[in-house]
Image: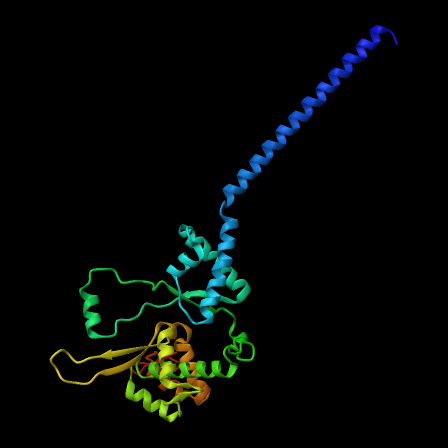
Amino acid sequence: MPPGRRRNRQVEDEESEEDVRQTQQQNGNDSEAEAETGDEGSDDEDPHRGADEQLAKKLVRYALSCEYSRTPIRRDGIKERVLGNQGRAFKRVFALGQKQLRAIWGMELRELPVREKMSLQEKRQAMKSNTQPKTGSGAYILTSVLPAAYRSAVILPPSNVPTLESEATYLAFYTMVVSLIWLNAGELSDPKLMRYLLRFNADRNVGAEKTEITLKRMERQGYVVRKVDRPPIGHEGELTVTWHVGPRGREEIGLDGVMGFVREVYGQDDNDLERKLHASLGIKQPREAGTADADGDTVM
C-alpha cells in the first residue's frame, strides 16, 4: 500500500476511535444523570417508606402480644417498645400498622374511652378545673372488623389458652356481669351483684377459679371498675362498694353486646322484651309508622 494511503487510513482509524470514546463517555454521563434523577425522585416520593414498613410490622406484633393477655396497648408503650428514637414517626407507623391489621388480621386498634367521673367529689373537681377534658385515653385494644356473619363462635372460637373451656367460661362470665351492671343504670351495688351471682351458682367459684380472683382480673383488665365510698372523716358508717362498666367493657362488649346477650337468653322475637330492654338501657326506640304523637295525631 502506498505510504500516502497508509497515513490516510491511520488518521481515519484514530478519528473513529476518538468518536467511539466520546460517544461512550457521553452515554455514561447520561446514564449516571438518569440514575441520580431516579434516586432523587424515589426519595422525594417517600424517603421513610422502608423503615416505616418495618416499624409497622413491629407494631402489629406488639399489639397482638398485648391483646393476647388483654393488656391495654398504650401510646407510651408503642413509643418505647416499637419506635425507640423514631417517636416523630408515630402517625405514619400507626396508620401503616392499622392498614396491615385490617387487611391481614381482620382487626384494628381502637382507642379506649376515658374513665368517667363517678363520685360527686370527682365531678366537682372536674368542674373547678380549668384544664380541657381529655378527648382520648391514649390506650388501645384490638377489635374485629370482620362482618357479623364471620364472628360466630364456630368461626372464631375462644382461645385454647389455658383451655378452650376455661376461656369460654371467663368470656361468658364477664359478659354477664357487664350486662347486669349496664341493665341496672350503669351502677350495681356489691350485695346486689352477689345476689345475682348466687342465682347463677357463681358466688364462690367461676369454673376452677375463685369468684373473687375472677372479679379482680376483670377489674385489672378494664372490664369493670370497683368503686369504694368511705364515710367522711369523723362520721360513722360502713364502706359502700359499687360496680361500674370499665373502659374495656364499654369498647369490647358495648350496648350491642348487652342487647345480644339478653336476646340470646330470653328470645329474639319479643316486642315486650325489646321495650323493656330499651328502657333499662336508656335507649330511645324509633317511632313506628302509624303511631300517634302527643297531640293524638297519627304520624306516618
Q: Residue at x 46, y 57 (%)?
A: 95
Residue 286 visible here: no
Please, which colouring scheme is shown?
rainbow
Q: Nearer the viewer, residue 110 or 224?
A: 224
Percent coordinates x, y for residue 252 in the rendering: 42, 73
Q: Residue at x 53, y 49 (%)?
A: 50
Q: Residue at x 35, y 68 (%)?
A: 113
Quadrant the C terminus occupies = bottom left
Name the residue at the right extreme.
1
Residue 171 visible here: yes
Number of numbered discs: 0
Q: Nearer the viewer, residue 238 or 5?
A: 238
Name the residue at the left extreme.
234
The answer to which image quadrant residue 230 occupies is: bottom left
237 sits to left or right of 85 = left
Percent coordinates x, y for residue 284 in the rendering: 34, 78
The answer to which image quadrant residue 209 occupies is: bottom left
27 sits to left or right of 219 = right
Q: Residue at x 19, y 67 (%)?
A: 125
Quadrant the N terminus occupies = top right
Percent coordinates x, y for residue 183 in the rendering: 34, 83
Q: Nearer the viewer, residue 24 or 135?
A: 24
Q: Is residue 211 above or below residue 19?
A: below
Q: Is residue 216 above or below residue 9?
A: below
Percent coordinates x, y for residue 82 in the rendering: 45, 57
